[in-house]
Amino acid sequence: MLARYLPYLLCEQCKQTNMKNKPSTFNLKTTALTLSLALCAYSASGIAANVDRPLVQPFASAFSKLDSNQDHRLNHDEAVQDQDLAQHFENADIDRNGTLSEQEFEQFKLAAQQARMEAFLDDTEVTEKIRDELVHDSHTKSLNISVETYKGEVILSGFVDTDQQAHRAVEIASSVQGVQTVKNSLVVKG
């Protein structure tokens, strides 16, 4: 039911525009949370409707593909097919017996998924903080500067009127906690 109204919720976010018909800054974290809750509710409704159908383990298929000798354990040679698993095999091997059980594999994959999600949310927070600072700074508030963040690397792009505005935007982005590098792709008009 909630999934049915999800497009309308998203459209309301998109309708918020300023006078130049450019999307206004909205809280990406809230939108991500709304999407997550909607998807969880949608998934839960599907599960409740099919109670008598067994649940499929999310990582069982991936484990089976890697388990070439079908002994229900992964050794290091089998794990090399998964680059992430090969790099962190020793950490994933909780009982330190040189092989991974299905449970150890699943725990590793869940932890890796969680780490990717946290990194995404951290990047989203950094982007939000930078946009907020740019909007509230008297030198950059009227500018249309695009901010993108990936693993702490920030890319600023768009058009500014002066070199000072570009420099100020880089200063603001660099001062936000979580920023490791700033790539300035701002273009001075004129």
Image (spheres, helix red, strand yellow):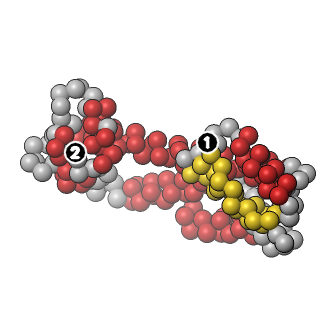
Residue 68 position, x and y percent, is 12, 51
> At x 60% / y 49%, what residue is drawn?
153
Q: Is residue 124 visible?
A: no
- Look at the image and tell me in which quarter the C terminus lies: bottom right
Callout 1: few (<14), some (14-19), or many (20+) C-alpha neighbours within 10 Å? few
Comparing 186 with 5, the one in front is 186
Q: Is residue 122 visible?
A: yes
> At x 71% / y 68%, what residue is drawn?
14
> At x 65% / y 65%, what residue is drawn?
10
> At x 68% / y 37%, what residue is drawn?
177
Q: How many marks?
A: 2
Residue 173 position, x and y percent, is 72, 47
Comparing 115 with 157, the one in front is 157
Label 2 and label 1: CA atoms lie apart by: 32 Å
Residue 89 position, x and y percent, is 27, 37
- Is the C-beta separation of discs 2 and 1 under 8 Å? no
